[in-house]
Image (cartoon, rainbow, N blue to C red):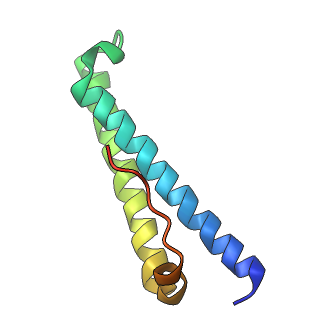
Amino acid sequence: MTEYKKLALAGLMSKAQTDKLEAETSLHILLDHPAGIGDHSTSDLHNNLNEALSQISDAEDRIETLEKHFPDFFTMTTVTAAPF
């Protein structure tokens, strides 16, 4: 595998994992720390919750797709995000 391909795949995985972690953080704040929400209407809150959930799903799909299509690379080079 070329160095460019390795870097590109690592970058794609890193971006997907970062997006997932950011969305999980948003969801955590919205659900567990209502003081951090500020002046939102109920509609805003539900829209923000749905948006964070969609972002998590999208990021997980990208991670799964990368692992499925490039299993040799991602079994050897595991990049993991820290859990809450």
Residue 69, given in percent of the width and then of the height, sits at 48, 85
Q: Is residue 15 left or right of residue 75?
A: right
Q: Residue at x 35, y 17 (%)?
A: 36
Q: In this view, does 15 lie to the left or right of 49?
A: right
Q: Looking at the image, is 73 positioned above or below residue 31?
A: below
Where does residue 65 sit, x and y in percent of width and height? Answer: 44, 76
Name the image quarter holding the N terminus: bottom right
Residue occupying the point 36% across, 52% down: 56
The C terminus, quarter of image: top left
Relative image position of residue 81 (x, y in whole percent): 43, 55
Residue at the image point whose x is 75% and y is 87% from the top:
2
| 17 relative to 66, above or below | above
On the picture, is 83 further left or further right than 67? left
Which residue sits at x=31%, y=36%?
27
For the image shown, how many numbered marks are present on the structure? 0
Towards the viewer: 7 or 16: 7
Relative to residue 70, is residue 45 depicted above or below?
A: above
